[in-house]
Amino acid sequence: MGKVPALRVGETVLFESAVILEYLDEVTPPSLHPSDPLQKALNRAWIEFTSELFVDLYRMALAGDREAFEENLAAARKKLQRLETQLAEGPFFNGAGFSLVDAAIAPAFYRISLMDGILPLSLFDHLPKVQRWSSALLDRESVRASVVPEFRDLFREYLAADGGYLGSRIGS
């Protein structure tokens, strides 16, 4: 289907990040979902919400011009502002314990940090809870080890090769 990520389980191929996360959570105890059914449902809803953030970040990364970049940056900021209202003291989405919502959004925070290294985005300005959440996730060994060591360079090469607005800012 041309989608990434994909996971092959025997002869079956799963696609869509949230679906793969749910599957892995079910087959790899202990579950990262809360045990309370209502809280679990809310977490699933926020995982779906984070999927929309990935779309904004993807469009932002590959935007052909500044106007498209700024439009998607504003959409991402709006979603992060919404997340700010959902967070308590943290450090994670549900408080002290790492959950599937955290696993779902960690790659977004990682990509934001990479893009911010190319062009300051100020996405976390006035969002102290989101900033704290991002830092807590990016400080986790499991998150750092979830990508190949050369991911930063590969990401920058990908953006530069695309020739879009952000890629053109690499090295400037």
Image (cartoon, rainbow, N blue to C red):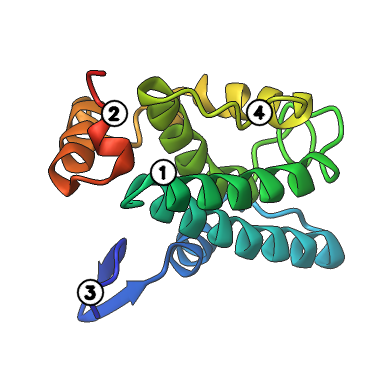
Asked whether residue 13 appears in the rendered view, the answer is yes
Q: Nearer the viewer, mark 4 or mark 1?
A: 1
Q: Position of residue 167 (x, y in %)?
A: 25, 37
Q: Nearer the viewer, mark 2 or mark 3?
A: 2
Above-or-below relation of 80 to 139: below
Asked whether residue 100 appears in the rendered view, the answer is no
Mark 4 vs 1, N-terminal side = 1
Above-or-below relation of 12 to 110: below
Quadrant of the drawing holding the C terminus: top left
Which disc number belongs to residue 2? 3
Q: Amino acid at mark 2?
A: Arg
Residue at image position (19%, 27%) is 153
Q: Amino acid at mark 3?
A: Gly
CA separation, marks 3 and 4?
A: 32 Å
Q: What is the number of callouts on the image?
A: 4
SS label for mark 1: helix
Which disc number belongs to residue 124? 4
SS label for mark 3: loop
Task: Look at mark 2 in the image and give the residue it sits on.
Answer: 169
